[in-house]
Structure formats: structure tokens, C-alpha cells
Amino acid sequence: MKVRFKRVRTVLILLVVPALGAFAALRVPAVQDWLFVEGVKRGMAVHADMTPAEGHLKVLLCGTSAPPPSMVRAKACTVVMAGKHVFVVDTGPGSANRLGLWRFPFERIEGVMLTHFHSDHIGDLGEVRMQGWVAGRTAPLPLYGPTGVEEIAAGVNRTYAADAAYRAGEHELDAAAAELAPMPFGLAEEAQRVKHDASAVIHDKDGLRITAFQVMHEPVYPAVGYRFDYMGRSVVISGDTAVSPNLVRAAKDADLLVHEGQSEAMRRTFAQALAEAGRTKLAKVIGQVGNYHVTPVQAAEAANAAKVRLLVFNHMGPIAPDNWLLRQIFARGLADVRPASGWTLGYDGMILDLPVGSKEIVERRVD
């Protein structure tokens, strides 16, 4: 018994004494500072999946929710990395914070591309502009979009003029580099509004071609989607749209189609619940959004018609499918249209890697 007690005492001493020593060390300012510095160094290292790579076309979903709030999703935002090129499509509220948490190199962004000018697609423009500037961008950030993007850029620049002046003076930065530089590409003429079938190549360099194409989002006009072609791999981003033959043409034979989806069953039920709760104005708004969005089944039908390899849903609503029940409602009817291997629900932090020279689409989650 005495021998056993001595052994237990020895084990306790070996465990407790170092623990007490470590606890005491953690109360020493120098040790705290060292741990803090090491944590910052590790935390600020650029995530491997956030780094552009030659021979890879990568897509990062940084915002997958429709306008209603979600605890786990930001509003519309997609990053496309093609070789050394980095572009962001839409900057919905909350998306800049997501990218910051993932240690995204904002200074690498060559341009932001807007699909249209709804608030849930432009709400973080000011923050994306600022983050890239203070991280090292030395020129204004190009802002691509259809006609009207000039007003968006001018408005953001005016809104953040004081902010830019404060930071420029305090941190010895060039205030001019804080601004957005509008890069309008048209696609907004009234004559084009009849068929919504126009398109334009807006970037063609280093093996990357970007095409903007009109979609049907009336009464919102103009509204566009984007196709990225890089060394034989292709990604199409729908933006917000109703049924659009032009999107099917633009997405022909694409590897990946990132497409919005609005559940009609969920929308009707949501509108009814809001009305019964006395939220009549909001119920009316929700009741109308089905006029200029597509259902998940319609998105799958578009993917089938375009012979797309993989359909990934984003901008999901009217309530984001953040639990099992909502996912079941959102996906109703999809199994009748497209095999389960041909579609998936996007989420914030989803990375889709399309290596050049293969047909692979590798899915990863930002850790």
C-alpha cells in the first residue's frame, strides 16, 4: 500500500508541478507577449487555398445567402483565382469579414465584378476597397460592371473620402489608391433589353478570358453573369436571374456553374407566415421575389441544357438552407431533374479547385 501511495504521489507531482509552473509562466508579461506574437505570425500567414496557383482555376464561395440574415452565411460573394489572376464577383454584406477571417490576401485582387446593383451584392465594397489598400495595393481598385457602375464607384469614393484621408495621413499611404476605378462594359442599352441576349469579353490575358453576359432579372436592369475560361477549364457565375436562355448559351459545356436558387415552396410558406405574424409589408416583398429569380429545379434544368458538369447553388433563399429541414425543402424536385452527383449546395468557405489538364473538380472547405 505504501509503495502504491508513493507511486501515486510521484505521478501527481510530475503532473501538477509542471502545470503550476506553466500557469505561473502565463502570468508573466514577457511570456504573454511572446505567445501573442507567435499567434499573430501563424494567424496572419496566407492560407494555402487563398493563394493563386499557376495551372489551377479555383473558386471560393465567400457569401452564399440571399438578403434575409443567416448565422453562417454572408451575402453574395465569389472569388475566382485563375493562375495568378484574382477577381471577386460581388461583395455582399459580411463577405469582407469572411475573407479576413480566412486570411485572404486582399491586395492580390485585380478587380471586383458586379452582377447588378442590389444592396446584397455591393454592401461590402467599401471594406474590400480599404482592406486591399492598407495591405499594399498601390493603385485604385478596378470595379467592373454594366453601365451604371460609374455611379456606384463615385458614390463609394465619396462616402469613404474622409476615411481614406485619415488613413493616408496616419499611415503614409497614397489616398488615390484607396479609390474604386469604374470599368463599365455596357450591356445596358435599351435595345438590348428586349432579348437580354448580349455579351462582351471584358478580359483576355495570360490564358484567362472573362465574358460578361446579360441575364433576366427584370425589373432590375442591367444584370449580368460572368464566365471565366482558363486553359481549358471554365466556371460560370449566374448572378441573380429568372429563367434566362442567354445564361444557358453562356454556360455551354462549362465545368462548373455557380447558380442562384430560390425555393418557391419556401417562399410561399415564408410569405404566408409573415402575413400571419402581421409583417404585411415584408410579406408582400417576399411574395414578389419569385418573379425575378429561378427555382432550384429551373437552375438544374438550365445546367442540363448547357451540359454543365457540376451545378453549385449559391444565393439560396428566400431563407438560407442552414438546417436539415430547410435543405429538404430547398432540394424538392431536384432528384427528378438532375442526378445527385451533378449538383451540390454551396456554403461559405467552399473551395472548388479545377486543375488544368484534367476533368477533376476538387472540393475543399477552408479550415
Image: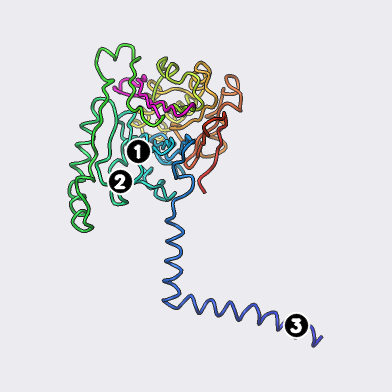
Task: Please provide percent x and percent y for residue 144.
Answer: 29, 31
Task: Point out the stretch of residues depicted in magenta.
Answer: 208-232
Task: Please provide percent x and percent y for residue 289.
Answer: 38, 25
* Label 2 sits on residue: 127
User: Is 98 included in the stretch rendered in magenta?
Assistant: no
Task: Please provide percent x and percent y for residue 167.
Answer: 22, 54
Q: Amino acid at mark 3?
A: Arg
62 lies above or below 244:
below
Q: Residue at x 42, y 14 (%)?
A: 245
21 lies above or below 157:
below
Q: Residue at x 35, y 31 (%)?
A: 280
Q: From mark 3 to mark 1, how far is it between C-alphas?
A: 62 Å
Q: Amino acid at mark 2?
A: Glu
* Label 1 sits on residue: 91
Q: Residue at x 50, y 79 (%)?
A: 24
- Name the secondary structure under disc 3: helix
Which one is earlier in the sequence, the residue at label 2 or at label 3? 3
* Circle 1 Cα neighbour tier, 10 Å, few/some/many (<14 / 14–19 / ≥20): many
Q: Nearer the viewer, residue 363 or 358?
A: 358
Looking at the image, the residue that sits furthest to the front is 206
Quarter of the image where one finds residue 159:
top left
Q: From mark 2 to mark 1, how far is it between C-alphas?
A: 9 Å
* Label 3 sits on residue: 7
Which one is earlier in the sequence, the residue at label 2 or at label 1? 1
